[in-house]
Amino acid sequence: MWLMRRDEFLDEVRRRGGLETRAEAELAVRATLQALGPHLSEPIADNLAALLPRDIGESLRSDGAPDDFIADLSRRAGVPAERAETLAAVVLGVGDDATDGTARAHLLPTVPGVPEPQSRYGPHP
């Protein structure tokens, strides 16, 4: 069972990311998680996906070889790399909050190029 509802998750991404619409927030979330998915082992992706709202978590289960995370996110979201890094920090921060810190513990040590999440849990120790 997830800890945050879909609408709540998207609204929080929209607010933290300075996005104008929920559609922009949804694009940022899907692009971030789809870029992240190939970097995660199947058990970690499944565990994290189970903690997120179903349709959001499903985005983690993307196929393909791992690519440069920020470059892949930039391409998927159609934004410059600097903006992609900000969006990643926002999406991963909301994801970290939604999973009570579980996302941070699994992502930062294993995925190169992942920015520090903008999370209520503060900087990674």
Image (spheres, rainbow, N blue to C red):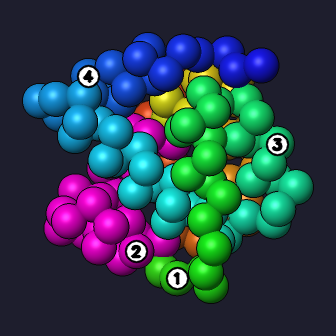
Tell me the residue that label 4 is attached to: 15
Badge 3 marks a residue whose secondary structure is helix
Left or right of 95? Residue 45 is right
Could you tell me which residue is drawn at 51 percent across and 61 percent down? 34
Label 4–label 1 contact, CB within 8 A: no
Q: Which mark is residue 42?
A: none
Marks 2/1 in contact by CB < 8 Å: the verdict is: yes
Q: Which disc is residue 47 wearing?
A: 3
Circles 4 and 2, Cβ within 8 Å, touching? The answer is no
Give the main secondary structure, helix, strand or loop, of the magenta stretch.
Answer: helix
Q: Which residue is mark 2?
A: 72
Circle nearer the N terminus (3, 1)? 3
- At label 1, the amino acid type is Asp
Q: Which residues are magenta?
A: 69-92
Residue 2 falls in which quadrant of the image?
top right
Q: Identify the amino acid type marked 4.
A: Arg
The label number, if any, that marks residue 67 in the structure image: 1
Q: Residue visible at 22% across and 40% down?
A: 24
Residue 55 on image: x %, y %: 55, 37
Dot placed on the residue nearer the N-terminal end, 4 or 2:
4
Element on which disc 2 rests: helix
Q: Amino acid at mark 2?
A: Asp
Q: Quadrant of the C terminus?
A: top right
The mark that comes first in sequence, 2 or 1, is 1
Element on which disc 1 rests: loop
State the separation of the CA atoms marked 3 and 2.
23 Å
* Callout 4 crowding tier (Cα within 10 Å): few <14, some 14–19, many ≥20: some
For residue 118, above or below residue 10: below
Q: Is residue 89 magenta?
A: yes
How far apart are the alpha carbons under marks 4 and 1?
Answer: 28 Å
Residue 112 quadrant:
bottom right
